[in-house]
Image (tube, rainbow, N blue to C red):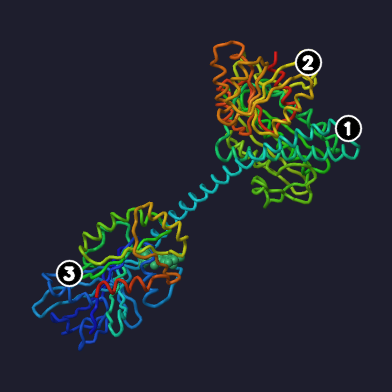
């Protein structure tokens, strides 16, 4: 059996957590928004270097704007975290630094990527301006719709976990 | 009654699975999930990869709610409990699909409405931003146009006073008309941008309604004659002579409506009717109604005619107009807490009407504070006195400077000195004696209003009391107010006509 690593994908609702995972796992996208409740778990095997594979167990959590309410059981045994926000909706990133504090206190010293999704909907230069104004540092700007940076993001995290 | 809830919250589907601590399946009752009894729990579903970390330090039990499991193409939403037992771990999987689907529908509606609300707020903020930009753009733009237009109007005037052939005179009359149209358009654009940016302030004063009606009657009777139409005004006997309100804006509203009626009426008549609605305390409500026998407005166009730059039927445009009139009417009435209403039948005609509340002033102050349009002839006549007036013109725009200089000299009643820097004005005033100062507000170094303040604070009477007339292209209400407070006697806004200038000059020349 391969090494398996548990990744939780967190963030406010509607930011594209489910879409990012679907793009990564099935390479598909839908414009329809179906609200996730509870948790969906999928598995994807990735090759992080030639001949070296690990399986990622992706936990797609119900979105919430109050991260304190996340059920602790969902976070048991987590190896890595992806925190997603929606670059088109300030409400999903204005409290980002506080949100990250909460995440870090729930899961201390784990690899964590901060991801701004729906980058296809904005002009990159404007976005960078907005983010820097809000003192937000991101690891990736992704688009589940076009697939931009989605694989890179998950692969990067996989390598951090290996 | 409780049945539907009982169904949602109780489930027949509860599956028991027993494993050892390594995750090997010892037994499963197969209630609803076909689990391979020979395999490990890890093979059942990726969810169970969490087993290893749970099993290692499982004290009593761990509970997961709302976990989605897919089995043979079927989707279940379950609660899963891991309980420590002698043999290893007991796993209890309860199927609450129906209950959770109801919850999902609620969450769906809630999230969608929150997100929509957010997106609408963002859109509105963007629109507002764009609207703001548009307004300031329009304002600056029309301001920039005023200076050259002032020159054009003045030069046209100068040329028309020289000797010209008939053909040249003819062409010049077209030029004049175009100038007038352009000025009208600029004024309208200014009004629109002032209304929509909230810069337009209503100014209440006591005025004579019958006098205003007379003026309207006079103006439009003539116009009706020209175009073979009939124009009549009917007013209610109960309407008081003096009322308090913004005369200028009310006049603008009514004339815009009448202009519009003329524009779309080819034959028949245009009527203005003023009705008395009611009186409460010292407030009276009046209805103004402009009725025409014109081409009418199709039902589906009624909304859009009040938008800026909408022209009902481009090809049937027979007279001048900017197409902004109705949207100005709408905006002004909105400021006055009123609303324009229309009734129309295509081919038969239209009726535009609005109700407006005006104050009725207490009797002893029923003195009109706004004079009727000045009688031009008289002022020009009065100027034919022998005295030659000495005027100091402070203007930096070389075009306007030349034009004003020449215009005023041509009347032969003025002698003029020109400076183009605000800082030089005081020096000139001290060393010479002038009857009046004509000063552009936007002078380099020291602005017109700063100069005015200096002058009004000056210790010597002959300088301190000199009449000051400001010229500005920024003809905003708020701007005019601060300018007046600087001590200027009057403000002329660009572009202006020679008559206007002379009228004002004469008013303040002794
Ligand atoms: N244009 C664009 N739309 C996206 C992108 N990612 C997601 N969406 C859309 O955003 C909406 C929400 O996407 P989901 O993936 O369901 O979001 P979520 O974070 O899983 O939402 P919850 O499950 O409610 O927390 C859907 O309508 C998606 O089609 C993206 O990269 N670009
Ligand atoms: Mg989701």
Write down the residue under mark 3: B62
Q: CA distance from mark 2 to mark 3?
A: 104 Å
Q: Nearer the viewer, residue B384 or B124?
A: B384
The N terminus of chain B appears in which quarter of the rendering? bottom left
Most extreme residue toward the bottom is B38
Label 2: state its secondary structure: helix
Please state the chain letter of the residue tagged with numbered disc 1 in the rendered image.
B
Q: Mark 3 packing: few (<14 Cα in 10 Å), some, or many (20+)?
A: some
Q: Mark 2 packing: few (<14 Cα in 10 Å), some, or many (20+)?
A: few
Q: Residue visible at 55% across and 40% down?
A: B197
Label 3: state its secondary structure: strand
Please state the chain letter of the residue tagged with numbered disc 3 in the rendered image.
B
| Residue B3 picture location, percent across and down | 31, 66
In the picture shown, does residue A156 fall above or below B112? below
Please state the chain letter of the residue tagged with numbered disc 2 in the rendered image.
B
First-in-chain label (3 vs 1): 3
Asked if labels 3 and 2 touch by Cβ distance under 8 angstroms, the answer is no
Label 1: state its secondary structure: loop
Q: Can see residue B340? A: no
First-in-chain label (2 vs 3): 3
Q: Mark 1 packing: few (<14 Cα in 10 Å), some, or many (20+)?
A: few
B272 lies left or right of B74: right
| Residue B457 picture location, percent across and down | 53, 16
Q: Residue visible at 11% across and 70% down?
A: B60
The answer to whether tags 2 and 1 share a subunit is yes
Q: CA distance from mark 2 to mark 1?
A: 26 Å
Write down the residue under mark 2: B382
Q: CA distance from mark 3 to mark 1?
A: 105 Å
Q: Which mark is residue B163?
A: 1
Q: Nearer the viewer, mark 2 or mark 3?
A: 2
First-in-chain label (2 vs 1): 1
């Amino acid at each position: 059996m391969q090494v398996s690593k548990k990744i939780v994908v967190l963030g406010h609702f509607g930011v594209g957590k489910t879409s990012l995972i679907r793009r990564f796992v099935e390479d598909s996208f839908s414009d329809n928004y179906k609200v996730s409740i509870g948790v969906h778990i999928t598995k994807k095997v990735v090759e992080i270097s030639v001949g070296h594979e690990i399986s990622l167990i992706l936990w797609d959590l119900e979105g919430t704007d109050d991260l304190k309410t996340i059920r602790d059981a969902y976070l048991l045994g987590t190896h890595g975290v992806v925190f997603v926000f929606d670059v088109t909706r300030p409400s999903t990133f204005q409290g980002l630094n506080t949100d990250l504090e909460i995440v870090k206190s729930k899961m201390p010293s784990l690899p964590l990527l901060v991801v701004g999704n729906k980058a296809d909907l904005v002009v990159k230069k404007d976005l960078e301006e907005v983010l820097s104004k809000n003192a937000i540092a991101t690891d990736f700007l992704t688009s589940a719709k076009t697939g931009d940076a989605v694989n890179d993001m998950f692969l990067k995290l996989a390598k951090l976990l290996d | 009654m409780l049945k539907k809830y009982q169904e949602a919250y109780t489930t027949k589907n509860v599956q028991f699975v027993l494993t050892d601590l390594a995750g090997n399946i010892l037994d499963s009752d197969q209630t609803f999930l076909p689990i391979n009894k020979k395999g490990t729990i890890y093979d059942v579903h990726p969810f169970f990869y969490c087993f290893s970390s749970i099993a290692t330090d499982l004290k009593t039990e761990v509970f997961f709610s709302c976990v989605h499991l897919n089995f043979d193409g079927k989707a279940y939403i379950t609660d899963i409990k891991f309980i420590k037992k002698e043999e290893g771990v007991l796993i209890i999987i309860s199927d609450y699909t129906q209950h959770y689907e109801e919850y999902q529908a609620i969450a769906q509606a809630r999230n969608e409405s929150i997100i929509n609300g957010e997106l609408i707020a963002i859109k509105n903020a963007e629109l507002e931003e764009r609207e703001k930009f548009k307004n300031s753009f329009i304002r600056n733009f029309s301001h920039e146009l005023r200076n050259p237009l002032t020159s054009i109007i003045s030069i046209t005037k100068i040329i028309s006073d020289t000797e010209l052939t008939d053909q040249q005179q003819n062409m010049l009359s077209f030029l004049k008309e175009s100038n007038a149209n352009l000025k009208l358009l600029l004024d309208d654009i200014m009004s629109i941008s002032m209304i929509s940016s909230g810069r337009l302030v209503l100014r209440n004063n006591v005025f004579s309604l019958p006098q205003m009606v007379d003026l309207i009657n006079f103006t439009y009777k003539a116009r009706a004659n020209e175009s073979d139409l009939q124009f009549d005004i009917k007013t209610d006997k109960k309407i008081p002579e003096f009322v308090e309100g913004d005369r200028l804006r009310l006049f603008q509203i009514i004339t815009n409506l009448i202009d519009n009626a003329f524009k779309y009426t080819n034959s028949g008549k245009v009527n203005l009717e003023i009705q008395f609605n009611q009186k409460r305390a010292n407030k009276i409500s009046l209805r103004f109604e402009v009725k025409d026998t014109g081409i009418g407005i199709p039902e589906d166009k009624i909304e859009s005619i009040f938008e800026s730059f909408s022209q009902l039927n481009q090809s049937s445009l027979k007279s001048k107009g900017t197409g902004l009139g109705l949207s100005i009417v709408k905006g002004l009435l909105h400021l006055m807490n009123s609303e324009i209403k229309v009734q129309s039948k295509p081919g038969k005609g239209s009726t535009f009407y609005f109700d407006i509340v005006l104050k009725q002033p207490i009797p002893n102050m029923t003195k009109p504070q706004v004079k009727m349009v000045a009688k031009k002839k008289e002022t020009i006549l009065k100027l034919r006195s022998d005295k030659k007036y000495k005027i100091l013109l402070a203007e930096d725009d070389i075009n306007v400077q030349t034009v004003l200089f020449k215009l005023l000299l041509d009347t032969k009643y003025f002698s003029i000195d020109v400076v183009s820097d605000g800082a030089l004005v005081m020096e000139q005033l001290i060393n010479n004696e002038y009857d009046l100062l004509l000063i552009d507000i936007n002078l380099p170094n020291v602005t017109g209003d700063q100069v005015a303040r200096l002058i009004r604070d000056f210790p010597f009477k002959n300088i301190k009391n000199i009449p000051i007339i400001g010229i500005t292209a920024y003809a905003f209400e708020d701007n005019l107010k601060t300018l007046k407070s600087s001590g200027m006697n009057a403000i002329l806004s660009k572009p202006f006509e020679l008559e206007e200038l002379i009228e004002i000059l004469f008013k303040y020349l002794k």
